[in-house]
Image (cartoon, rainbow, N blue to C red):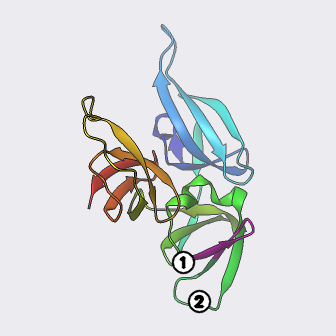
Amino acid sequence: MLSYNEIKPRKFIVFNGEPYEVLDSHVFRKQQRKPVNQTKLKNLITGKVVENSFHQSESVAEAEIDKRPIKYLYTNKGEYWFAEKDNPSKRFTLPADSIGAKIIYVKPNDIVDFLSFNEVPIGIDIPIKVTLKVTDAPPTIKGNTAQGGNKQVTVETGANINTPMFINAGDVIEINTDTGEYVSRV
């Protein structure tokens, strides 16, 4: 059980009988009243986002999310194909709405975590930082860096990332998958 102030981002809770991921939380006091935790919760089955306030006397159960490593294979007509990590013959597909937008940072044959709640698939979890090769980068124009400019490059998965001007095609860069931002050159 989690008390009201332990409900923090990236935690999974059971709320109204369904699994939710905590997206945002803010503990505050209104004048002389007791503290309240104002949260934004995302339903892991439907994807719906709701807001809820947890008071000091309330507690919720932590959701037991099963994680197991799987291998991403390919995308075909809006379906994402995966296989068991150690047994490539056991293949399965997941629809685009359960995968989320972070799939653009995953290359074929990368290992990701498959998330399920009571044997119901709810999505995938990818590492916070990934390294990808830059496939297309516009040339740097002299005199364009007075304000420390950025340029948009394309990485091997097709994602567009804002990077500093010194990044060129063929470089390998590290990307934060939570924010979609450039971290460093590898």
Three-letter amino acid code at the position of disc 2: Pro
Examine the structure image and report whether residue 74 is included in the region drawn in magenta: yes
- Residue at 47%, 26% (x, y): give it: 27
- In the displayed structure, does residue 152 sit left or right of residue 116? left
On the image, which quarter does residue 23 sit in?
Answer: top right
Check disc 2 and report the residue beneath it.
88
Q: Which stretch did the figure color magenta?
A: 70-81
Q: Nearer the viewer, residue 157 or 83?
A: 157
Q: Main secondary structure of the magenta part?
A: strand
Disc 1 vs disc 2: Cβ atoms closer than 8 Å? Answer: yes
Identified at 44% across, 49% down, the residue is 161
Q: Quadrant of residue 84?
A: bottom right
Q: Which residue was labeled with disc 1? A: 71
At which x and y percent is residue 124? 58, 63
Residue 104 shown left or right of residue 142 in the figure: right
Question: Relative to the observer, which residue lies in front, 49 or 138?
Answer: 138
**Looking at numbered disc 1 in the image, what kind of residue is underneath it?**
Lys
Image location (x, y in percent) of residue 57 = 56, 30
Q: Is residue 109 above or below residue 23?
A: below
Mark 1 residue element: strand
